[in-house]
Amino acid sequence: MIGPYYKPQMTSMLSITHRLTGLGLSFGAILLVTWLVCLASGVDCYNVIAPHVTAWYGKLVLVAFTWALLYHFCNGIRHLMWDLGKGLDMPTAEKTGWGVIVVSVIVTAAVWAIALATK
Amino acid sequence: MSYRSPLGRARGLGSAKQGTHHFWIQRVTAVALIPLTLWFVFSLARLPSADFEAVTWWVAAPSVAVALVLFIGCALYHSLLGVQVVIEDYVGSEGAKIVALVLSKFVHVVAGVAGIFAVLKIALA
């Protein structure tokens, strides 16, 4: 894809972002499992990692994971629509692409507004 | 010239009627993950506290434990299939590719088993 003949396009940028967020989420799944195993191991183990989760850098990672998950979620639905043969023409693909960017950012903000309001 | 039969040469190379299995399971797990992901994100956001008692109490509820097991299972299966494609696309040499594929499979299975076991241990305690 990257080469002398490649002109950056919004649709291909979203495509590689889908892969990158997917890879990021694979690491996120391993962190989630680590967190659950610590929780199951007892309060002492949980309290070793809990301060890192609630620290500013932990929150930053969690916000990044929230957005990556919601981006992959929205763009995944876009992919499933393509699999049904819908929205494959360029104007629609660009429109739904912008939709994915906007919706993933808005829902990430909404999720964190809920999270911060309930704690 | 080779003395192998045409069937012997063809076996292990062709589709064996499995050609669309990877593609299809990737989509089936994606569809299953639509409600599971929404539930997971908003449930975590609405947790009143992230301390040990609050989170343990949340995981131990039967409906939450079942949904978590389904989420972990579907997410890691979906991840396994996705990472497999990324490795196949970007790892050039055949040896490194096979090592990476097997390593990815091991990591995903271990993560899935560990995550599901942790949820069950908390829920059945």
Image (cartoon, coloured by chain):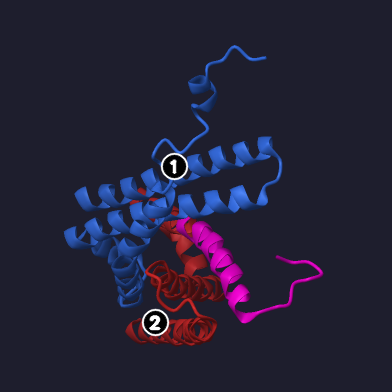
Chain colours: A red, B blue
Give the magenta part as a residue range: A1-29
Q: Is residue B47 above or below residue A29?
A: below
Left or right, residue B54 beside residue A26:
left
Q: Residues within 10 Å of mark 2 (few under 14, many from 20)?
A: many
Left or right, residue B51 beside residue B86:
left
Asked if the residue at tag 1 contacts the one at tag 2, i.e. Cβ–Cβ closer than 8 Å, the answer is no
Which amino acid does the dot numbered 2 rest on?
A: Val
Q: Is residue A15 magenta?
A: yes
The circle drawn on residue B61 is: none
Question: What residue is shown at x 51% (from left), y 83% (from top)?
Answer: A101
Q: Residues within 10 Å of mark 1 (few under 14, many from 20)?
A: some
Q: Which residue is mark 1?
A: B110
Q: Secondary structure at mark 1?
A: helix
Q: Which residue is mark 2?
A: A111
Left or right, residue A86 beside residue A12:
left
Q: Is residue B23 above or below residue B92?
A: below
Which of the two residues, B85 or B10, is positioned nearer the viewer here? Answer: B10
Q: CA distance from mark 2 to mark 1?
A: 30 Å
Q: Is residue B85 magenta?
A: no
